[in-house]
Amino acid sequence: MSRGTRQEVLLPLEEPSLGAVRARLVQKRLGEGCASKGTLPRLVSTGKTGSGKSTLGNLLVGADDLLRTTGHQDCTDAAHFLTFPHGLAYVDLPGVAGDDLLENFNRVALGMPQTPTWPTVEEVRVLRYERLRCTGEQRYPAEGFPTDLLQPDLVLYLIAPHRGFGRAEAPYLKDLLCAVGSERVLFVLNLFHGAGGRRMATAENLEDVHGQLARWHREVGLTLDTSRVVPMDCRSGAGLAELLSAARDYLGGSTALTDVITYQSERALGVYREEIQRAVVRFAAQVAPSSPADDESASELPAMAGRLLLEYAGRLAENGAAPHDAWLEPFAALIGKEVAKLRKVATEPIIERRSKDVYEKVPRYGWVKETDYDRPIYETRAAR
């Protein structure tokens, strides 16, 4: 087996996510019911098309595709009203500042006057969901829309920093702050991740978002409270506990949300530790039964596995940049010692082709080789 083939044998180490663990525990607690702890809030999400509003709704309800999340403007052309089994409600509104600009839909749903800048909305369509399925559709005339139907306890304004946060959103956001009150708006910076887990938003993107938010608050006579700007990954769930914690604080210390947060915080590290242990055992199990192709490659696979495990340990300890050579040298020596114990040497006769010059007129193709079977040659080589 060649070196290239040997490296393909080693599967990647699947690294559990603490954020995903926390999200699952939040979903589990919401499903179990915490209504006895108090009333859960109605969260209404709004923001630009493709910022992750539907993804956050799917995360909260524990489903991957209940709400469509293609990122196109016509993906959400209605208010999606998700009711959890024990009181929490989540409303996913259409995106603003997109191609078809359904901003006036959001304005009607949130009790704000429509703007003549965009086409007038004549009706508001509401889709209701219960227990992971759509249970009905209702249509209301925009004129006289019941303001209490979708009225939020808290507005989650989602922003995808890597896609820019421009002035197209400014009029809507400033009117929203004035209409519902800045104390009822949380800004969620949805940190998308690309291939290899790389965060797509740069430090400059994040700085720009904070600068724009601060500016638009000033333009309506308000001051941005940076504790109301919460970063999270709506797909993996990293940051969900922090978002709910912020929501609890700005809802006057909701005891129901406190129960959800306490539940996950008490269990998350233990569950996370168990998932790490299982991932490492699975990784080691694929290395253990492998056999080397030859002496030269005998220690390659365990050495590579050792390096990957040390790098992972460094990331868990938050010192992933630390050099691992000091740890790997004794490990490599131990591997060499164990490989030497397994090596067996055998001596066996082989026949070597002998050659001699032939002096005759023949085309020059090189040497002519003849075999002398009366004189065998011996060599020592490793047993297979």
Image (cartoon, grey):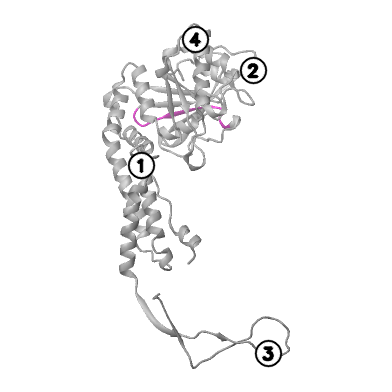
Q: Is residue 155 left or right of residue 250?
A: right
Query: Which residue position is annotated with label 4?
Result: 178
Q: Earlier in the sequence, mark 1 or mark 4?
A: 4
Q: Which residue is mark 1?
A: 314
Q: Look at discs 2 and 3 and give the one toward the viewer.
A: 3
Residue 360 vs 164, above or below: the answer is below
Which is more toward the observer, 343 or 36? Answer: 343
Residue name at image x 29 percent, y 45 percent: 274
Q: CA distance from mark 1 to mark 4?
A: 47 Å
Asked if the residue at tag 4 contacts the one at tag 1, i.e. Cβ–Cβ closer than 8 Å, the answer is no
Q: Secondary structure at mark 2?
A: loop
Query: What's under tag 3, amino acid-wise?
Result: Tyr
Q: In the depicted view, which residue is nearer to us: 46 or 35? A: 46
Percent across and percent down for residue 255 are 28, 22
Q: Is residue 328 visible?
A: yes
Distance CA(mark 2)–CA(mark 1)? 52 Å
Which of the two marks, 2 or 1, is nearer to us in this view?
1
User: Which contiguous range is marked in magenta?
Assistant: 75-86
Mark 2 burial class by Cα count in 10 Å: few <14, some 14-19, many 20+: few
**Does residue 13 belong to the magenta stretch?**
no
Which residue bears the numbered disc 3?
359
Q: Tell me: residue 348, above or below residue 333.
A: below
Foreground of the two, 51 or 40: 51
